[in-house]
Image (tube, grey):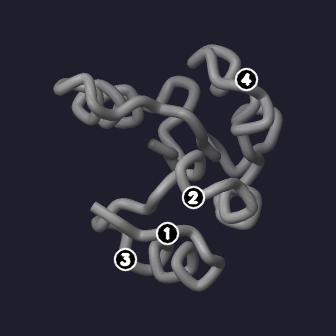
Amino acid sequence: MGMVGGGGEAFIGAIHQMAAQLDGKIGLIAGAFSSNAERSKRSGETLGLHPSRVYGDYRTMVIEEAKLPAGERIRPGYSKRAKNHRRVAAGVHQGR
């Protein structure tokens, strides 16, 4: 799972992460946790993510994730319609 926002001290970010991982089938592997690249990087470190999968903004995340092989890149969820359309347009697979 990739996450946009919710880094640092953002309460709702931790709630979304916990909820997504309840069944053990989803793990957080990438994110753009803040519009501030340094804060996003710190959040990624705190969460134990590989530095190459932590981005300074969601646009960069979409572009870079689209370059990865299909089985390794993140797939958009269905609740953030406008951002999902941008992801699909950038070539990030949308699946269930």
Please name the amino acid that badge 2 sits on.
Answer: Ala
Q: Is residue 60 visible?
A: no
Give x and y (percent) for residue 63.
73, 66
Q: Secondary structure at mark 2?
A: loop
4 or 3: tag closer to the N-terminus: 4
Q: Secondary structure at mark 4?
A: helix
Dot 1 crowding, Cα within 10 Å, few <14, some 14–19, many 20+: some
Query: Would you place residue 62 above or below residue 87 in this image?
Result: above
Residue named by callout 2? 70
Which tag is nearer the camera, tag 1 or tag 3? 1
Q: How many labels, in total?
A: 4
Residue named by callout 1? 93
2 or 1: tag closer to the N-terminus: 2
Residue at image point 64% right, 24% down = 49
Residue named by callout 3? 81
Q: CA distance from mark 3 to mark 2?
A: 21 Å
Instruction: Tell me if label 2 and label 1 are in contact, CB under 8 Å.
Output: yes
